[in-house]
Image (cartoon, grey):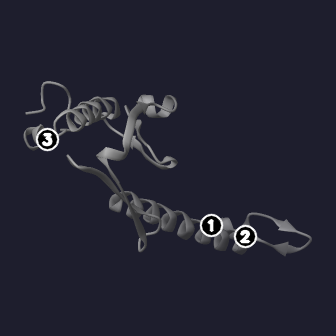
Amino acid sequence: MIANMGKTLGFTYGGMVVIILLIGAVVMFGGLWWIAQVYKKTVFIITSRRLTKFIHTTPWTRYQMSLGLDKVVDSGAYSKGYIQAIFRLGTFVARSSAGNIKNFKIENIHYAEDLHNWMNKLMFTFNKDVAELDTFRPFVAAPMGKRD
């Protein structure tokens, strides 16, 4: 059926359609594999001393950025559209005193607003009394009431 899809000027192009569909399928599944690998390997870590992210740009290459809590000026969380709102995702941003160059922006995370509130408490404790950071409770990405 696909081989007899039509003739143009006596030239059958049904075989070309099959080849193009196969190439398209290979490219699509290759792209989905690529996105899945990059997504699984990219990590963002917040400790009581610094923010670190390992960003994979390809399945084989990555770069690392770190920012000490003493350099974090402010943090924020927001949703960028209806798709993020439907899936309850958000964007978390930690602004640096170094300007726009060192901002940490983490997109499509659950509980972004809760992470923002926790980060503000962490920065307040860091600026007030560094010794209290050893007893600071870690952030748990779970609904309220289930964070034990």
Q: Does dot 1 land on a helix, a strand or a loop?
A: helix
Quarter of image, res 6:
bottom right
**Outermost residue to the right:** 9
The amino acid pointed to by label 3 is Leu
Q: Is residue 95 left or right of residue 144?
A: right
Q: Which residue is mark 3?
A: 133
Of the image marks 3 and 1, the number of the one nearer the N terminus: 1
Mark nearest the camera among 1 and 2 is 1
| Quadrant in which the C terminus appears | top left
Q: Residue at x 52, y 30 (%)?
A: 81
Q: Residue at x 40, y 32 (%)?
A: 77
Q: Which residue is mark 2?
A: 14
Residue 21 - label: 1
Q: Residue at x 50, y 28 (%)?
A: 82
Mark nearest the camera among 3 and 1 is 3
Mark-to-mark CA distance, 3 and 1? 57 Å
Residue 104 - label: none
For the residue pair 99 and 47, the one nearer the viewer reads as: 99
| Quadrant in which the N terminus appears | bottom right
Q: Is residue 77 left or right of residue 28?
A: left
